[in-house]
Image: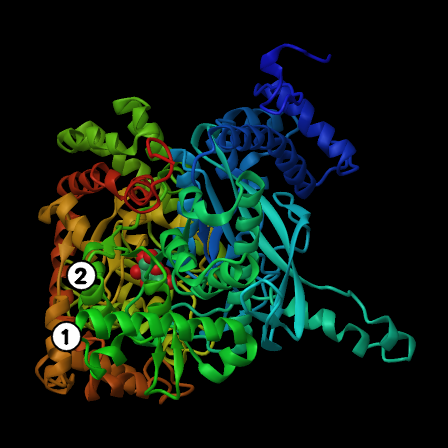
């Protein structure tokens, strides 16, 4: 029936769809309708996968209603939008998140049950959207969810990779990389937007043109052009209040086939252009804190930056007369330097295409952009060879030179900088075969630059950006990372969520900081017992996964001691493995002692070109094989490496941990976010004073976290002193014996020298302070062994961890960005 009352019309006077009811009857009817008319199956013949699709489509309809409402509301309010430019969005599965946030979990479960279908089973068939490598990409996904949950009108912009993060298998202990294929069955969450497509140029020439009556201007004539086509995915916030958009770009050739070539018999050549264009968005670079310096990477970066800016400008011009107020209406966040070329591209669009003068364009650009730095590792800071940059992006290169000239002039004339100081801030690194420094470009092109934890932000000021910080002392600020409690508590740990709801009511679901109300229950024996029972169930679930995937049995009453994250030397999985070997040795030599049973669990991927990281994976597997088969240690120690770590696996792992390993070399982990997920789910942390561990210590209190090892400044000091591991190893028998065991080939009799270089690095320089921190780490682990035997005390600390993690919600991070950097979202002028 057509309704004509006002409320049924949206702002443009268009008929609003009837609201869909959320009861199990209606849902069951609609799911079957989708099954029948969209998928062409009836309930009797439908397979699990068909049910997943039908359910997704029925849920999607509801999201679309909210999506339109959100869009209408922004349009009416005319407020400021936030555009989050990120090369990575590590989202994981979407169905559970969507139904949780819409409050549909139970009705959908019931609707499906009527057809004998289990929601928990079909959810598992959804592929992970793995468009990211690790923490950086997962942070972007948490931020998208939190923007929608806190009412910030946010647009994510990124790349629609056909192949996301590779699938990892372990063969004879070693990592093998296989292509990931998340789109093979299509992607029901996305909408292709043919009308939102833009041309992206590469190469070619720049020439000055002079038209009558106009100032001379530069015109770029690219040699190559490809098309960027938008695919939109709705991002549902908590309680469906707001739905934002993630817009991912896919590359296509302007001409799908060169017919001339085809007709003259060159059938392969006819497709060359199209293959070349599509290659841009074919694969995610599996490079985390590791420079991926290939030309294709720079193409990807420019491709998605330019498409996003063209889209932002088009939308702005639809709603405004011109671009001079761009910064009042849009805040663009650069997630790391991957989209930093945007600074030059926006200048090009403003000056060359929209006719702005240089100075005004520069003012707009700086007011619009802000930049987040995620790492201080020198090898991860992007810098592109000038010759490559110039060949691919000749006009942007000119613009970078011009920006640089302005900055240098300012530094020299207004601040009296000498040549050395100028070289330090220059956007061009002259010492290294001449390169464009993307960090410097992002910094100077932004009004705000942030680090991701307090310590990291301080170190940024002292190290990578020391000179620019001196020149612009107000620009750097801190925004400590956070994680979304919807995915990482409610969805991953429904048992614990239920217990907390029972204890303090559901208020913490809307305001996670209220979770502090369970803090006093740490003293309540009955509560602790139930808290522990939930942990136990979660451990059993993980034990089953380990049993199924790896045919290894682990005992859920042992300490589940877990380190999951990308494999990197600075994250020090190696230290953890050495401790496992030392423990193995001690258990064998002293079987009479009262050892606390422990299962050491590892998971994570190594960049395919990162040799040492792959050796570390191999070592973990080799050590596990020997220890797990040794009857002498029985169930006292197990070491397992679970293959193919991804978001979905993390959702099973986080709730199952007793102990969270956050043991990076101090000063090197920018923040960490796994640390927050574990603690929120009641794990105790063993960690260094690094990244957000420092703030976690402040929040949970020193009795509830286990900190060991050198501090960041001590690490820096030792590195200056050319520290090496040899003398420490000589004086520390446990460490020496563990290393001797590795070197002897005990764990790899087939190839005894396999790990020689890993070990000799420790003797020769111990760059990551593994030897330096070994003893403190060992001792702290034994304190934890002891504590675990006093379950009351352990569980009380676990409760305190969960209770005090509210601040580490990405809702809090987003509110801080909105207030201090973007000036957008609820309560902000705009
Ligand atoms: C990085 C940092 C982490 C940080 C995360 C998000 C690059 O993630 O190293 O310390 O928490 O960004 O800011 P990762 O190492 O997981 O790739």
Q: Which mark is residue 607?
A: none
Which residue sits at x=19%, y=76%?
Answer: 417
The reply to whether residue 130 is in sight is yes
Badge 1 is on which residue?
A: 716
Which residue sits at x=14%, y=30%?
Answer: 520
Q: Name the secondary structure under disc 2.
A: helix
Furthest residue in direction top, as rendered: 5
Question: What's the image's color scheme?
Answer: rainbow
Q: Position of residue 787 (x, y in %)?
A: 13, 50
Q: Name the secondary structure under disc 1.
A: helix
Q: Is residue 672 left or right of residue 552?
A: left
Depth check: 650 or 114 in front?
Answer: 650
- The answer to which image quadrant residue 570 occupies is bottom left
Q: Which mark is residue 458?
A: 2
Which residue sits at x=48%, y=60%?
Answer: 346
Q: Position of residue 14 (x, y in %)?
A: 66, 23
């Amino acid at each position: 029936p057509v309704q004509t009352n006002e409320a049924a019309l949206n702002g443009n006077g268009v008929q609003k769809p009837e609201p869909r009811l959320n009861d199990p009857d209606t849902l069951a009817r609609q799911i079957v309708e989708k099954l029948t008319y969209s998928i062409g199956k009836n309930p009797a013949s439908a397979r699990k996968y068909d049910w997943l699709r039908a359910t997704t489509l029925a849920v999607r309809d509801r999201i679309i209603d909210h999506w339109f409402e959100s869009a209408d509301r922004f349009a009416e309010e005319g407020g400021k939008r936030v555009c989050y430019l990120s090369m990575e969005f590590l989202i994981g599965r979407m169905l559970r998140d969507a139904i949780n946030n819409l409050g549909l979990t139970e009705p959908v479960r019931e609707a499906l049950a009527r057809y004998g279908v289990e929601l928990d089973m079909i959810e598992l068939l959804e592929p992970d959207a793995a468009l990211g490598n690790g923490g950086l990409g997962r942070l972007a996904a948490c931020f998208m969810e939190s923007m929608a949950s806190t009412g910030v009108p946010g647009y994510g912009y990124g790349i629609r990779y056909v192949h996301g993060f590779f699938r990892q298998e372990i063969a004879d202990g070693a990592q093998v990389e296989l292509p990931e294929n998340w789109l093979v069955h299509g992607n029901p969450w996305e909408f292709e937007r043919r009308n939102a497509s833009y041309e992206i140029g590469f190469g070619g020439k720049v020439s000055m043109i002079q038209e009558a009556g106009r100032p001379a201007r530069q015109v770029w004539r690219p040699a190559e052009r490809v098309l960027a086509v938008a695919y939109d995915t709705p991002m549902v916030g908590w309680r469906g209040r707001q739905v934002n958009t993630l817009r991912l770009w896919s590359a296509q050739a302007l001409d799908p086939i060169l017919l001339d070539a085809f007709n003259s018999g060159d059938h392969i050549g006819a497709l060359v252009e199209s293959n070349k264009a599509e290659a841009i968005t074919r694969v995610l670079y599996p490079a985390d804190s590791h420079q991926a310096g290939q030309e294709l990477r720079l193409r990807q970066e420019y491709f998605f930056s330019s498409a996003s800016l063209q889209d932002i400008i088009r939308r702005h011009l639809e709603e405004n007369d011109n671009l001079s107020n761009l910064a009042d209406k849009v805040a663009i966040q650069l997630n790391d330097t991957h989209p930093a070329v945007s600074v030059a591209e926006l200048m090009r669009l403003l000056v060359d295409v929209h006719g702005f003068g240089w100075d005004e364009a520069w003012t707009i650009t700086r007011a619009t952009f802000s930049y987040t730095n995620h790492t201080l590792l020198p090898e991860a800071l992007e810098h592109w060879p000038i010759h490559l940059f110039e060949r691919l992006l000749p006009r942007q290169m000119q613009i970078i030179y011009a920006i640089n000239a302005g900055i240098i002039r300012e530094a020299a004339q207004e601040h009296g900088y000498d040549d050395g100081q100028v070289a330090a801030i220059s956007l061009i690194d002259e010492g290294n075969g001449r390169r464009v420094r993307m960090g410097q470009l992002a910094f100077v092109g932004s009004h705000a630059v942030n680090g991701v934890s307090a310590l990291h932000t301080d170190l940024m000021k002292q190290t990578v950006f020391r000179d620019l910080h001196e020149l612009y002392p107000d620009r750097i600020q801190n925004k400590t990372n956070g994680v979304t409690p919807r995915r990482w508590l409610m969805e991953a740990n429904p048992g614990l969520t239920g217990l907390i709801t029972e204890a303090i009511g559901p208020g913490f679901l809307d305001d996670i900081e209220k979770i502090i109300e369970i803090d006093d229950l740490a003293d309540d024996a009955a509560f602790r017992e139930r808290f522990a029972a939930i942990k136990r169930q979660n451990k059993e679930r993980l034990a089953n996964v380990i049993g199924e995937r790896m045919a290894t049995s682990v005992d859920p009453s042992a300490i589940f001691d877990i380190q999951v994250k990308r494999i990197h030397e600075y994250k020090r999985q190696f230290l953890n493995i050495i401790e496992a070997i030392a423990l193995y040795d001690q258990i064998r030599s002293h079987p009479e002692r009262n050892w606390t049973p422990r299962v050491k669990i590892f998971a994570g991927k190594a960049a395919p070109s990162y040799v040492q990281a792959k050796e570390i994976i191999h070592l973990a597997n080799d050590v596990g094989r020997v220890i797990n088969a040794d009857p002498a240690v029985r169930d006292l120690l197990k070491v397992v490496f679970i293959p193919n770590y991804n978001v979905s696996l993390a959702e099973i792992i986080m709730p199952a941990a007793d102990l969270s390993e956050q043991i990076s070399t101090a000063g090197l982990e920018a923040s960490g976010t796994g640390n927050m997920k574990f603690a929120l789910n009641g794990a105790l942390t063993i960690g260094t004073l690094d990244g957000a561990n420092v703030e976690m210590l402040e929040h949970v209190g020193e009795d509830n976290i286990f900190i060991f090892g050198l501090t960041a400044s001590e690490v820096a000091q030792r590195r200056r002193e050319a520290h090496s591991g040899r003398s420490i190893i000589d004086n520390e028998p446990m460490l020496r014996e563990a290393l001797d065991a590795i070197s002897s080939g005990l764990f790899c009799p087939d190839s005894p020298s396999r790990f020689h270089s890993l070990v000799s690095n420790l003797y020769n320089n111990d760059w990551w302070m593994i030897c330096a921190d070994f003893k403190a780490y060992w001792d702290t682990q034994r304190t934890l062994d002891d504590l675990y035997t006093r379950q009351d005390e352990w569980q009380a600390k676990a409760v305190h961890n969960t209770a005090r993690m509210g601040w580490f919600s990405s809702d809090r991070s987003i509110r801080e960005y909105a207030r201090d950097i973007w000036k957008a979202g609820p309560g902000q002028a705009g």
